[in-house]
Image: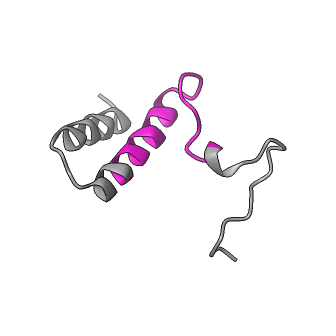
Amino acid sequence: MSFLTREFNRLNCALLQGHNDDVTKRLYAAQQAVSWALDPQGFKSALRPYYGHSGRLRRLSGVS
């Protein structure tokens, strides 16, 4: 079992434990990133929400 597979399993277990909304969102984001790393063709990149239609990184508020 690879490190990424173990980490994915740990994230799944943590998500099933039931946390507050903020922790759940962070765990889910981490799970999605690991899922993409394991299977880039089957999952969207974790950065995809930050890119516009042009494929360029959009400016995020509060980031210089």
Q: Image quarter for residue 28?
A: top left
**Chief secondary structure of the magenta portion:** helix
Residue placed at 59% from the left, 23% from the top? 41
Residue placed at 50% from the left, 36% from the top? 37
Residue at the far top in the pictured view: 42
Identify the image quadrant of the C terminus: bottom right
- Residue 34: percent from the left, percent from the top? 43, 39
- Residue 4: percent from the left, percent from the top? 37, 37
Q: In the displayed structure, does residue 21 sit left or right of residue 48?
A: left
- Residue 9: percent from the left, percent from the top? 26, 34
Q: Which residues are magenta?
A: 26-48
Q: In the displayed structure, does residue 6 sit left or right of residue 44?
A: left
Q: Colour scheme of this structure image?
A: one colour
Residue 30 sits inside the magenta stretch: yes
1 and 29: which is toward the camera: 29
Residue 36 sits inside the magenta stretch: yes
Total marks drawn?
0
| 49 vs 41: above or below | below
- Residue 38: percent from the left, percent from the top? 46, 30
| 37 vs 1: above or below | below
